[in-house]
Image: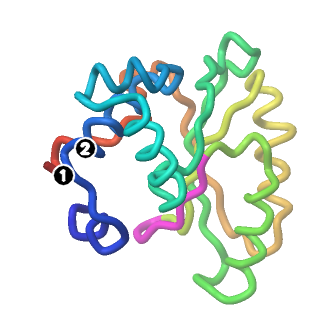
Amino acid sequence: MKNMMNEQMSLDKFDLSLLTALQADVSQTHQQLGERVGLSASQVSRRVVRLHAAGIIERSVALLNPARVGLGVRAIIYVSLVRHGGEEGLAFEREMAVFPEVLTCDAVAGEADYILQVVAGSLAQLSDSVLRKLTRIQGVNSIRSNIVLQRIKSSTELPLTQCF
């Protein structure tokens, strides 16, 4: 990871400290961030702009509690296609890009071709609107799903201490 970052942009200890602080709480002011990482607010501002421009900071978002907004069912779904490539894969990926219940879609090597993280309001909604839609996508051979009973850990923070 360190080599990939250095090829795109040279990150120093201030950048990594700033990114760590932003991952914990993006709502901090530049003044607050500066106090935390040992830079002036104007230096923080310039660095944040540079990190956005380099694509290291992709976007800033609010992380919502799915259950509190009515999406209390989470499933991990394993999808296998009829063929491992070609038009089936491209068609499936296009469908996933516009499928709002799919939080993540990863192409993987192993038993499945794709692993999805999906949310729904209920088990019935998961079955009716999510799994039925998936089975209708051309090229889908099989779907296997696991319902998440309890989330043990959830993080969006990358372990940047490994980059120092």
- Residue nearest the observer in this picture, 78 or 63: 63
* Number of numbered discs on residues: 2
Q: Answer yes or no: do the residues labelled 1 and 2 have beta carbons within 8 Å?
A: yes
The residue at which mark 1 appears reads as 163
Residue 66 image point, x, y percent: 65, 21
Q: Is residue 156 magenta?
A: no
Q: Quadrant of residue 3?
A: bottom left
In the image, 74: left or right of 7? right
Residue 39, horizontal then vertical, whole percent = 28, 32
Residue 162: x %, y % from top left: 16, 47
Q: Residue reaching furthest bottom?
A: 86
Disc marking residue 160: 2
Magenta part of the chain: 104-111
Identity, as a three-letter code, of the amino acid under mark 1: Cys
Residue type for callout 2? Leu
> Considering the numbered disc 1 on the image, is that residue within a helix, a strand or a loop?
helix
Mark 2 lies on a secondary structure that is helix
Please name the residue shown 49% across and 49% down the image. Answer: 57
The alpha-carbon separation of the residues under discs 1 and 2 comes to 5 Å
